[in-house]
Amino acid sequence: MAGYKSKHMNPDVYYKLVQFGYDTWGKEVTGGMNVQQFMDDLKAKDPYYETPDNFVLASFMSVRLRALTLGMNHPVKCSEYWGEIAEAELNRLGLPYESWDEAQLMKYQPELNIQKSDFY
């Protein structure tokens, strides 16, 4: 999970964090809660104590871009746009999506700056 660590390492909580951060914050993700309630709920279920900067900063950018487009009454689901771009770039580099396994992930793992918290 690329530097993310939580108390229980609950994959459902991690998936919702990633889905919220990089894709959509629709009711299907948040369960109808507002953003603060949703994040508080996830933190209560499985408090995180380490997060890499690239996880936080990239998701922050995605949330801000989606807020901007929503303000223009044009909600965007990032995966519908970024997935195709990412696959094309991997193919251009000779690293097609289908070739990725744990060894390849470790080979190309970026240097991570991990933020640690003792509050959980």
Image (cartoon, rainbow, N blue to C red):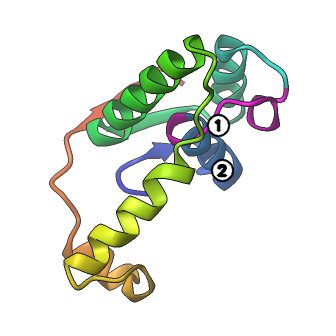
Q: Mark 2 points at which residue?
A: 10
Q: Element at badge 1? A: loop
Q: Which residue is drawn at 70% across and 50% down?
A: 12
Q: Mark 1 points at which residue?
A: 46
The outermost residue toward the left is 111
Q: Report if the CB atoms under discs 2 and 1 are less than 8 Å apart.
A: yes
Front residue of 78 and 104? 78
Q: Residue at x 64, y 37 (%)?
A: 46
Q: Which amino acid does label 1 sit on?
A: Asp
* Up-down relation of residue 58 to residue 87 (above or below): above
* Up-down relation of residue 87 to residue 23 (above or below): below
Residue 79: x and y in percent read 54, 51
* Up-down relation of residue 79 to residue 73 (above or below): below
> Over which residues does the magenta segment extend?
21-31
Residue 64: x and y in percent read 43, 20
Which quadrant of the rendered structure holds the C terminus? top right
Q: Is residue 48 left or right of residue 25?
A: left
Q: Residues within 10 Å of mark 2 (few under 14, many from 20)?
A: some
Front residue of 81 and 12? 81
Residue 1: x and y in percent read 45, 57
Q: Does the magenta stretch include residue 29?
A: yes
| Distance of label 2 from label 1 (alpha carbons) | 7 Å
Q: Is residue 9 left or right of residue 28?
A: left
Q: In which quarter of the image is residue 27?
A: top right
Q: Residue at x 34, y 36 (%)?
A: 58
Q: Which residue is drawn at 20% across and 48% down?
A: 112
